[in-house]
Image (cartoon, rainbow, N blue to C red):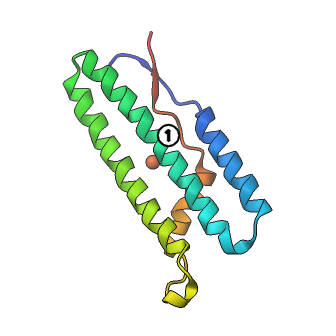
């Protein structure tokens, strides 16, 4: 769109991560997975809201080409949120059900969400 990219850390995501880390330190190991996954869900909800706003603005500017790309990103974020929600449900199932909390891959993903410092999807006009 001819704008400079603002790839500075997103204060909202940093706040979610900070809260998640603080809560994980304060709690019992048995529910750390749930806390990390809740943090991941909050992050995905934020990212979805950002993409929805960007899509509205791109559509208003008549940039259907950009809208299509943003919608692809939005779909990915929604898919990730669905995965996180499923992992949250698994993490809360009693161990007697034969499940052992969230799948390792999703636990790792949640931990990466907390530790990676995602960037805001923002651009800065000239
Ligand atoms: Fe995401």
Expressed as whole percent of the image width and height from the top left, the position of residue 56 reads 32, 24
Relative placement, left or right, of 34 versus 49 is right
**How many numbered discs?**
1
**In this figure, which residue is indicated by the disc labeled 1?**
46
Expressed as whole percent of the image width and height from the top left, the position of residue 60 reads 27, 16
**Pointer 1 local density, CA inside 10 Å: few below 14, some 14–19, many at least 20:** some
- Residue 99 shows in the view: yes
Q: Report the quarter where the N terminus lies.
A: top left
Q: Report the quarter where the C terminus lies.
A: top left
Task: Examine the rendered structure and indicate whether residue 69 appears above or below residue 86.
Answer: above
Relative placement, left or right, of 104 versus 23 is left
Q: Residue furthest right?
A: 26
Quadrant for residue 101, please give it.
Answer: bottom right
Measuring 39% from the left and 27% from the top, which residue is drawn there? 53
Expressed as whole percent of the image width and height from the top left, the position of residue 5 reads 46, 24
Measuring 72% from the left and 60% from the top, which residue is drawn there? 24
Measuring 25% from the left and 22% from the top, which residue is drawn there? 59
Task: Examine the rendered structure and indicate whether residue 31 appears above or below residue 25.
Answer: below
Expressed as whole percent of the image width and height from the top left, the position of residue 34 reads 60, 65
Find numbered disc 1 in the image and state the secondary structure of the residue it sits on. Answer: helix
Q: Is mark 1 within 8 Å of ligand 1?
A: no
Relative placement, left or right, of 53 versus 105 is left
Task: Examine the rendered structure and indicate whether residue 71 appears above or below residue 85.
Answer: above
Q: Nearer the viewer, residue 91 or 69?
A: 91
Q: Nearer the viewer, residue 61 or 112?
A: 61
Q: Residue furthest top?
A: 126
- Residue 102 shows in the view: no
Q: Nearer the viewer, residue 118 or 84?
A: 84
């Amino acid at each position: 769109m001819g704008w400079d990219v603002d790839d500075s850390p997103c204060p909202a995501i940093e706040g979610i991560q900070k809260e998640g880390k603080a809560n994980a330190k304060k709690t019992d190991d048995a529910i750390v997975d749930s806390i990390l996954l809740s943090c991941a869900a909050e992050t995905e909800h934020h990212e979805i809201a950002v993409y929805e706003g960007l899509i509205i603005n791109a559509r208003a500017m008549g940039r259907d080409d950009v809208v299509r790309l943003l919608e692809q990103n939005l779909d990915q974020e929604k898919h990730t949120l669905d995965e996180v929600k499923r992992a949250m449900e698994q993490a809360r199932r009693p161990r007697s059900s034969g499940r052992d909390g969230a799948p390792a891959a999703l636990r790792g993903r949640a931990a990466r969400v907390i530790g990676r410092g995602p960037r805001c999807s923002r651009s800065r006009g000239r």
